[in-house]
Amino acid sequence: MTTLDTRPGAAAATAPGADPLAVWPASTAESPHGGLLVGGVSLTEIAESHGTPVYVLDENEVRERCRTYRNAFPDAEIHYAAKAFLCRALARWVEEEGLGLDVCSAGELELAVTTGFPADRILLHGNAKSPRDLGTALRLGVGRIVIDTPAEIARIAAAVGPGGRQKVMVRVTPGISAGGHEKIRTGSDDQKFGLSLRDGHAQHAIARILDQPQLELTGVHCHLGSQITDVKPYLVAVRRLVGLMARVRDTHGVTLPELDLGGGHGIAYRPGDPALDVTALARGVRAELAGSCAAAGLRVPRLVIEPGRAVSGPAGVAVYRILAVKRTPGRTFVAVDGGMSDNPRPALYGVRYAPRLIGRHSPADSESVTVVGRHCEAGDILAEDVSLPADTHPGDLLAVPVAGAYHLSMASSYNLVGRPPVVAVLDGRARLLVRRETLEDLRARDVGL
Ligand SMILES: Cc1ncc(COP(=O)(O)O)c(C=O)c1O
C-alpha cells in the first residue's frame, strides 16, 4: 500500500495487527463505556457542549511535533506551513516553540502578524501573488519573499523602491516527482509552481534578481510535493540545488547562504500507513548537504524546511454525529453531519480515513461500512471498509483522527452548512479557538436582491 492510498476501497481502513490508536494524538486514552479522551478531555463531552461537527486540536501534540523538528534539525530554520491550518492560537504555539511561518496570502500573513508573530520569521509564497499580498508583505516587513515566476522580479523590486532592500529566495522545480497524489506533486517541470532547473528558467531568474539592487537573494527553494514518505527525493533535491548554488557561485561570484527544502513530510492517516521518519530525514539531508557542498567547494548553507501537515495533521480530530444509516444489497452507508465542506481531501485526492465510533460500547458484531458525508456529491466519502458495530445508528458519534491539516483550511460553505468550530484541548481542559460559522454569518455576506 502506498502512503496515501488513492484507490477508493483499495485497502481496509486499518491494516491487520496495527495499533488502532497509532494515528491518534499521543494523549488519546480510552475511557469506560466506549469514551475517548484527547488531551484529557472526553470527545463525547466536547460534542455535547460544542455541537457537531467539531474539530478538536491537541495543543501538546502540536507543540511536541514542533519540538521533534527542533531536535531533529537543531541548526535549521523550521517554518510551519500555515496553509495546513492557521488560527491565532496555533500561530502562538508555533511561535513559542521557536518555529517560523510560511504563508501564502495577505490573509495568513495579517492574521499571524496581528497575533504577534514576528514578521521577519515569516516567508511569503505564492505562484500568483496579488498586489495586496506583496503590499502587505512589504508593509509588515516579511522575512523573505519566495519568487515563483519571472514577472515578480521587477514587480517586487519596483514595490520596494529606491533605497529599499527586500530579502528574497527563488523557487526552483528540480525535476523530481514525489508525493502521495499527482495533484500534490510540485517538484516536476511543466506545472504552475516554480522555475525549472532543466530549461534554464531558474538560472535566468537568478541572474535577473542579482541585478536588482532592491533585492537580496538569500537562497534557493524547492517544495517537491506533499505526503512524501521516503527520504530519497529530498536527497536528490539537495544534490541538484547545491549544484545550482555552485553554478551561481561560478557564474556570478555569489555564494548563497540558504537552501530551503520546503515541506511535504508524509504522515499516516490510517494505522499501518507509512510515514516519513523526520530523524532519518534530518540525518540524510545533513550528510547529503555536507557531501555535496564539499564536492562543490561550497560552504554548507543554512537549511530551511517548511513542514505543515506533519505538525498539525495528527493533532486534530474531527467529531461527527451520525445522521443516517442506509443498507443496500451490497453495502452499508453511514452518513455523518459533515463531510466535504469541512474536509475536501477525500473528494480531491481520494484519501480515506479510519474513523471510530465513540461514546458507547456495543454488544453487536461489527460490519464493514462506508462512511459518507452529508453533501450533495457522490464523491463525499470519508472512509471505506470501516469496521463499525452492526447496531450503529443515527445519533451515534464518530471520531476521525489525523484531521488537523488541510481540512478546515480548505473548508467551504458548500450547501450552506457552516464551517465547524475548533476546540483546543490541554491537560484536561477544553477551550474554544474558532467558533462555528452560523447561518447568520453566511446570510450577512449575501447583500443583494
Ligand atoms: C511551498 C510549500 N511549503 C510547504 C508546504 C507544506 O507541505 P506539507 O503540509 O505537506 O508539509 C507546502 C504545501 O503545499 C508548500 O506548497
Image (tube, helix red, strand yellow):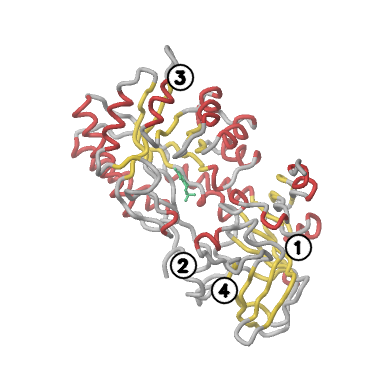
Question: How many callouts does the rendering have?
Answer: 4
- Between the C-alphas of marks 1 and 3, the distance is 52 Å
Residue 1, horizontal then vertical, whole percent: 42, 70
Q: Earlier in the sequence, mark 2 or mark 1?
A: 2
Which amino acid is tagged 1? Thr
| Quadrant of the drawing holding the C terminus | top right
Numbered mark located on residue 384 in the image = 4
- Between the C-alphas of marks 2 and 1, the distance is 30 Å
Is label 3 in contact with label 2 (beta carbons under 8 Å)? no
Which amino acid is tagged 2? Asp
Q: Nearer the viewer, residue 85 or 25?
A: 85
- Between the C-alphas of marks 3 and 2, the distance is 45 Å
Which amino acid is tagged 4? Glu
Q: Label 1 belongs to which residue?
A: 44
Q: Label 3 belongs to which residue?
A: 160
Other residues around mark 2 within 10 Å, as few (<14) / some (14–19) / many (≥20) = some
Q: Residue furthest top?
A: 163
Which residue is drawn at the image coordinates 30% and 44% (left, top)? 238
**SS state under label 1:** helix
Which residue is drawn at the image coordinates 52% and 59% (left, top)? 348
Q: Which of marks 1 and 4 is nearer the N terminus?
A: 1
**SS state under label 4:** strand
Residue 24, horizontal then vertical, whole percent: 59, 61
**SS state under label 3:** helix
Which residue is drawn at the image coordinates 51% and 51% (left, top)? 309
Is label 4 in contact with label 2 (beta carbons under 8 Å)? no
Of the residues tagged 1 and 3, which is closer to the observer? 3
Of the residues tagged 3 and 2, which is closer to the observer? 3
Q: Label 2 belongs to which residue?
A: 5
Other residues around mark 1 within 10 Å, as few (<14) / some (14–19) / many (≥20) = many
- Between the C-alphas of marks 4 and 2, the distance is 12 Å
Residue 444, horizontal then vertical, whole percent: 77, 42
